């Protein structure tokens, strides 16, 4: 499975793995699998991370590089991950005026009530890091928000 990866992808995976190998023992905590995959520009769902061996708590399991490389190769092939364009199309559904803005209240509701829900604290962190100020009518430009969020790859540790 990992043999499907190009040499440059293996090198990037090795670098990201080394960043999350805090103990220097050539393993990473399985809790960090999702963050490591996101650092490699993938957008796995929490469900997919769990299926690939990710854990919900720190210290439950360690993963070696060859295991991580196999996970990376599998997740890279997944079709069930969104990219900027996919997410932008979703947010356009809330753009009633077709002017590149949406109600902040609708974005808030989407983040804390739909799909892989965020807690209010997580939502606050995302807004603080990625949100432009809303206008007097409560609208925000959603494309810059999404771009900042995708570029920063806001890490949410539960």
Image (cartoon, helix red, strand yellow):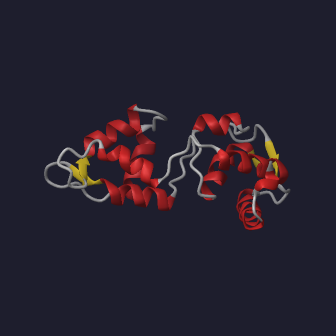
Q: Residue at x 64, y 58 (%)?
A: 40
Left/right of residue 158 with respect to residue 100 in the rendered view: right
Q: Position of residue 64 (x, y in %)?
A: 83, 50
- Camera-side residue: 7 or 53? 7
Q: Residue at x 49, y 35 (%)?
A: 116
The answer to whether residue 125 of the structure is visible from this angle is no
Quadrant (top left/top right/bottom left/bottom right) for the C terminus: top right
The answer to whether residue 141 of the structure is visible from this angle is yes
Q: Quadrant of residue 31?
A: top right
Left/right of residue 1 with respect to residue 105 in the rendered view: right
Q: Residue at x 48, y 62 (%)?
A: 151
Count of picture labels: 0
Q: Quadrant of residue 57?
A: top right
Q: Position of residue 157 (x, y in %)?
A: 57, 45
Left/right of residue 93 with respect to residue 42 in the rendered view: left
User: Please, is residue 86 above or below residue 46 in the view?
Assistant: below
Q: Position of residue 47 (x, y in %)?
A: 61, 34
- Camera-side residue: 132 or 98? 98
Left/right of residue 8 with respect to residue 99 in the rendered view: right
The furthest residue to the left: 136
- Camera-side residue: 44 or 35? 44
Q: Position of residue 10 (x, y in %)?
A: 77, 62
User: Please, is residue 31 above or below residue 51 in the view?
Assistant: below
């Amino acid at each position: 499975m990992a043999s499907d990866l190009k040499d440059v992808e293996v090198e990037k995976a090795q670098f990201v793995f080394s960043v999350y190998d805090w103990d220097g023992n050539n393993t990473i905590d399985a809790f960090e699998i999702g963050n490591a995959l996101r650092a490699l520009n993938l957008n796995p769902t929490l469900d997919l991370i769990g299926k690939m061996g990710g854990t919900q708590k720190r210290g439950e399991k360690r993963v070696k590089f060859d295991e991580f490389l196999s996970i990376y190769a599998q997740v890279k092939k997944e079709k069930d991950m969104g990219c900027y364009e996919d997410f932008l199309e979703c947010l356009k559904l809330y753009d009633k005026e077709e002017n590149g803005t949406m109600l902040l209240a609708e974005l808030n509701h989407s983040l804390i009530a739909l799909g892989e829900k965020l807690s209010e604290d997580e939502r606050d962190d995302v807004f603080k890091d990625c949100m432009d100020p809303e206008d007097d009518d409560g609208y925000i430009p959603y494309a810059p928000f999404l771009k900042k969020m995708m570029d920063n790859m806001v890490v949410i540790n539960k």
